Structure formats: C-alpha cells, structure tokens
Image (cartoon, grey):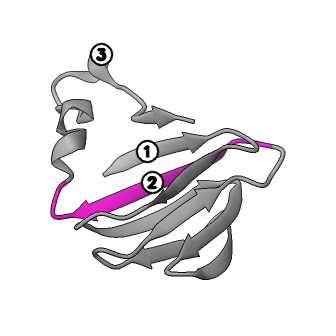
C-alpha cells in the first residue's frame, strides 16, 4: 500500500509493471490512462490496473491529489518506505510529485 500526493499539473509518466494495482482517490483527481483508455477520476473513485498494463496519471486540477494504491504482489522497490506499526516516527510519504 502506497500513499501518493500528486501536485497540480504534475504527472506519473506512462509506465508498466508486473504488479496488479488497485487504487482509491482520496482527494482531488485527474486523468488516468490505462491501456490507451482515458478515465476522469475524482475523489471517492477507485480503479484497477492489470499486471503489465501501460498506464499514467496527470493531475489536471488546481489542488493536490492524494491516492492510495495497493500492489499485488508487493512492490519490492517500495519496501523501504513501509512503516512498521511500532515505529510511528518513521512515517513517510512515498512520493511527492
């Protein structure tokens, strides 16, 4: 599970990975493209990105967007950002874009 904060006019560029990705827009929204299909997502929306699917996100709003993404299997490259329950002082935001 990863919390993303995406600033206005910022983007997560087109990419793909072996992980299935499930997400929920907590605040804000933007344009989410999955395998060439464009979706307008807003606060409260959820989405699914299949393993290997090319996707990107652009915050086209005037305020930050906050998204929580869940990856299956776990993203090995994000393990260092995980917070252990007994270590609240180590709370970190994975990515501020």
Instruction: Give yes or no for residue 85 being in the magenta stretch.
Output: no
Residue 45 shows in this picture: no
- Residue that badge 2 annotates: 68
- Residue that badge 1 annotates: 3
Q: Residue at x 21, y 42 (%)?
A: 77
Residue at the right extreme of this rendering: 62
Disc nearer the start of the sequence (2/3): 2
CA separation in Å, label 1 and label 3:
17 Å
Nearer mark to the viewer, of 2 and 3? 2
**Which region is colored magenta?**
63-74
Instruction: Tell me: 40 left or right of 73.
Output: right
The picture places residue 30, in percent across and down from the top left corner, at 70, 61
Mark 1 vs 2: CB contact within 8 A: yes
- Residue that badge 3 annotates: 89
Instruction: Tell me: 22 left or right of 44.
Output: left
Q: Secondary structure at mark 3?
A: helix
- Eyeballing the image, is 88 above or below 64? above
Q: Residue at x 61, y 68 (%)?
A: 32
């Amino acid at each position: 599970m990863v919390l993303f904060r995406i600033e206005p006019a910022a983007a997560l560029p087109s990419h793909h990975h072996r992980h299935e990705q499930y997400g929920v827009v907590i605040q804000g929204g933007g344009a989410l493209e999955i395998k060439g299909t464009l979706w307008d997502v807003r606060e409260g929306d959820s989405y699914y990105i299949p393993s290997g699917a090319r996707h990107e996100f652009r915050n086209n709003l005037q305020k930050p967007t906050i998204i929580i993404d869940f990856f299956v299997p776990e993203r090995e490259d994000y393990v260092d950002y995980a917070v252990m329950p007994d270590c609240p002082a180590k709370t970190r935001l994975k990515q501020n874009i």
